[in-house]
Amino acid sequence: MMAIWFLFALMTGAAVFALLWPLSRRPDPALPEGGTDSVLATETEFYEDQLRDIERDAARGLITPQEAEAARAEAARRLLRASRTLGDPAVARVGEPALRHRRAASAFALSTVPLIALLVYGLYGSPGLPARPQAERLATARDAGRDLAAGVAQIETHLAKHPEDGRGWEVLAPVYLRLGRTEDAIRAYESALRILGETAPRLADYGEALVAGSDGMVTQKARTAFEQSLAADPGGVKPRFYLARSAEQDGNRDLALSRYTALAEASPADAPWMPLLRESIRRLGGTPSAAEAKPAPGEDQRSAIRGMVAGLDQRLAAEGGSPEEWARLVRSYGVMGERDKAADALARARAALGDKAAPVEAVAREIGLSSP
C-alpha cells in the first residue's frame, strides 16, 4: 500500500516539475552580439518565403484571391509580432525579481497541488475501499448477463434433446418474456400447456405473453386464454385485469369500469397492482375511492366472487353470450361447489348454443357433470 502512495507522489511531483521548470530557469543574461538581429533576419526570411508561396499559389489558381489576401495579412501580423518581441530587450531578458517570483510560484504549486488533491480525495473519495478497477466492475456486470444467457442456453439445449419436458418450457417461458423474446415466450407457454395441461395460472401467463406480443392489445386468442383461466379460478387477478382492459379497448367503457372497480374492491389496498387499477378507474371517469379502502378478507371476498358469477349468469340469461362465456359460468359454479347451478347452466347453454356448445361440454366433462 505504501509503495503505491509513494509512486503516486513521485508521479505528481514529476508532472508539476515538468510544467513549472521553464518558469524557474534563468534566461541567458546576454544574447550574443547580433543575436537578435540574426534571429529577426531568420524570421523575416521565413515570412518572406511564405509570402512568395502565397503569391505563387494565387498565380496558379490554387487559392482564391480572398484566401490569398487573408493569408498575406496573417503572415504580416506574425512577422510584426516576431519583430516586436525579438527587438525588445525587456522581453529578451528576465530580471532577478521576476525570476524570484516565478520560483516562489513554482514552489507554492509544487507543495500545494498534491496537498489539495489528497484533501479532495479524502473528503469525497473512498480510500478505505479495496481497489476495484473499472474493468473488474464491467466484468461483474457482463458476468451477470453471461450467467443468464448461459442458463437460458443450457435449458434450450436440454429442451432440444427432451422437447416433452413441460416443466422446462414453463421455466423458460417467463425468462423469454423478461428478455423481450415474446414470440419464443408464446411458443414456450404453448408447449407447457400442451404437455402439462391447462391451469388457471398457466393460461393467465400465456394470455399475458400474447398481449405482450401484440403490443399491449388483448387479442381474441388472449381473451380466450384469460376467460379460460378465470373460469378455472374466478378470483384470478391477472385475467380479470386483462379482460377489463379488453373491454376498454373494445370501447365498452361501462363494462371496463365495472370490471376494474370490482377487481379493485376485491384487492388489498397495498396490492402492487392497485396504482394501475386506480389510474384506469380515473381514466374511465370512475371514482377509485372504493378501491382505496382495504376490503375485508375471507367471507366478504368470497361473496364478491359469488356476486360476479351471479352477474355473469344474469347477463347470459338475458342477453346470451359466447360459448366461452357459458363455459366460464359452468366452470365457476363447479369450482364453487354449486353443482346444481352448474348443471342448470349447462342445460341452458345447450339450449342457447345448439351445436356450438362444444367448449361447454368440455368443461362439463372436466368438472364431472354427467352427460344428458
Image: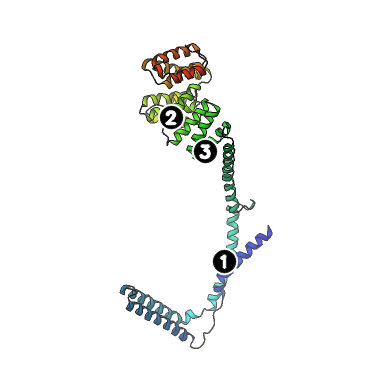
Q: Which mark, residue 109?
A: 1
* Residue in front for this viewpoint, 222 or 252: 222
Q: Type of residue at label 1?
A: Ala
* For residue 195, above or below residue 30: above
Identify the amino acid type marked 3.
Tyr
Which residue in the protein does label 3 denote? 176
Dot placed on the residue nearer the N-terminal end, 3 or 2 = 3
> Image quarter for residue 345?
top left
Q: Work out whether mark 2 precedes mark 1 in sequence or the reverse, and give the earlier one.
A: 1
Q: Residues within 10 Å of mark 3 (few under 14, many from 20)?
A: some
Q: Residue 171: x, y in percent?
A: 56, 34
Relative image position of residue 341 (x, y in whole percent): 47, 12
Q: Nearer the viewer, mark 2 or mark 1?
A: 2
Residue at left offset 54%, top offset 76%: 97
Amino acid residing under circle 2: Lys
Pick the quarter of the image with the N terminus. Answer: bottom right
User: Which element carries disc 3, helix, strand or loop?
Assistant: helix
State the SS at label 1.
helix
Say which residue label 2 marks.
Answer: 221
